[in-house]
Structure formats: C-alpha cells, structure tokens
Image (spheres, rainbow, N blue to C red):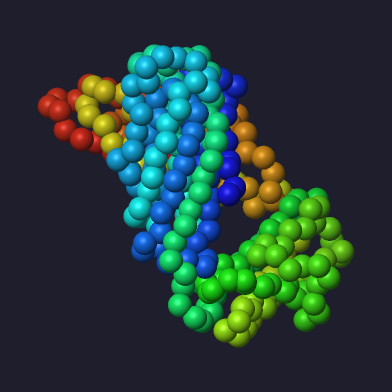
Amino acid sequence: MDLTIAALGGARGVYTYRAKFLLDSTQPEGSTLTASVLSGGSLTVLLNGQPTGLANLAPAFPGPHRIAFSFTLTNGFVAGVNTLDFVVDNSTTAPNSPGGNALRVMSIRGIGPALPAGLSIARQPQTHTVRVGGRVTFDVIALGRPPLRYQWIGDDVEILDATNRTLTYNPVTDFDQPVTFKVVVSNDSGSQISEPADLIVVGDNQPIVATNITLTGFSGTPLRLPLSQLAQNASDPDGDSILFSSFDPTGMNAVSPGQITQEAATLVCERQQLRGRRPVQRRSG
C-alpha cells in the first residue's frame, strides 16, 4: 500500500490523502476492501476517482486523530493499479472542523477471488527522460496467479538482484546504469517478456507534468480548488518533490473574467456576476 499525504502545514482547506494498491493476482469482480481510519475533520472516500457513497460529513466532536471511521468496499475495482482517496475537509465551514488536517490509516485489507490460470502483461514499462542526479523508476503490471516472479534486464544482461515489480535508480548518472530495459515475468503458467523501455539522461530539469482539473459552479458562487488536488494531479519526471510556489491572480476566461486569490490551502476564483444562474466550467492546469 503506497500512501501519499498532501499536507500544507495545517492550513485550513480540503486535503486529499491517496493510497495506491495493485490487483494483479485477484479478479476485480468479487474483491472486497475494508479500512479503518482516524481523521481530523469531515471525510469522504473515493475509489479510482469515483464517489463511493461513503462519508463521515458531520463528526461528533473536533480534534486530530479522534474520529474513527470504518468502511467496506465491494465494487469499483479495476485490474492493475487502483487509487483510494480520503478527502478530509477542515475548512471553517465544515461541522466541528479542527485546526489540523490529520489523517491516520489504521488498517487497509483486501481479499478477492484468484485469477484463472495464465499470465499476461497489462502495462508495459515506459520510457523515461530524467536529468543527471534525478530519480527514475521503471515498473510493470502483470496479471496472473501468484507467485509472480520478475527479472529485469538492462542492455540485454540480467541485472543483479533486480527481481521486484519496480526498478529504481537514484541518483541517475551519465553512465552507471543501462539505457534499455526489459523485464521477464513468470509464474507457474509460464513466462512473458516485456517490450523494451529506454532511459534518456539529460542535463536539465524536466518540466512538471500536470493534468487539467475541471471545476463546475454557478454564477455568483466562487470556484474553489484545493491545493492538494493540484499536487495529486501533478508529477515530476526527475523524481523531485513538488512544491506550490505561485499562481496567476487573473482568470484567463474572457467570457467570464475573474480574480484568483489564495485562502489557506485553497485557490478561490471570484467571477463577475452573470445574469441568471447557470453552470459554468473552468479548467486549471
């Protein structure tokens, strides 16, 4: 379980805490996940970006790590990587919201029916461009009955002790690691070899990769974008930490111009009042 915490010094706002888990030996249909968490504010649970209907929106009393919440999920899973988002709201409008933004995951457990006999590679290793001194991780997703075994190959030679699903080099140098990678995956049903992936080493930092976020609101109502959502939708090809530094205070929508400000851990877009009350959308990269 890979738990990523988006914390911004305890400032009030909406925080997304993300756990990633892999379904590579079980069928998504019929799988079950149970979890127990302690949160410091209103809590909503998403699975693979979709609402689960699970929420604890009005905790009885405030205080970090005081509000226990347990739940079970029985659908919405996919083969391969799944994301489980815990959205904690400690804004001033949330009921009994404390000043902290704490979340503690006490347990996450899953079980599901085994895959039928066989073996396949669901996601191939990807080519990476990384600066000298950066960090790179190659990974593969295979589907099959356990145990799944891995052997990474670099420049057509087996890499010593590279027998996990992922392969990391940190730091990346000009010449100390291979430049072309493949991985052999095997189980009792046989073996599969992946397509090759390259490592391209450059001298300069690579730009952060960010996906657009669509917000829907109404005329006269501010649009609010949690900074933790920005962080969860961005990645750094060089493996560096992502920090929020500045923003453009002027909206770029000529039809519905607005002013953007920061309130604690949230960006707020105030638009000019429009006649009527109709939905509008704004994208943020």
Above or below, comparing residue 192 to residue 208 in the picture? below
Foreground of the two, 33 or 274? 33
Q: Can residue 249 be seen in this view?
A: no
Does residue 108 sit above or below 132 in this rendering? above
Can you name the residue that lies furthest to the left here?
276
The image shows residue 207 at horizontal and vertical percentages of: 62, 48
Residue 8, placed above or below residue 5:
above
- Name the image quarter holding residue 96: top left
Q: Residue at x 33, y 21 (%)?
A: 58
Residue 151 horizontal/vertical position (percent): 72, 74
Q: State the residue at coordinates (74%, 68%).
A: 163
Residue drawn at (61%, 78%) of the image: 187
Q: Where is residue 17 in the image (x, y as percent from the top left)?
A: 51, 37
Toward the viewer: 135 or 151? 151
* Residue 218 as seen in the image, left or right of residue 56: left
Q: How many marks?
A: 0
Left or right of residue 133: residue 84: left
- The answer, for residue 208, to whether it is visible in the render is yes
Q: In this view, which residue lies farthest toward the right?
A: 176
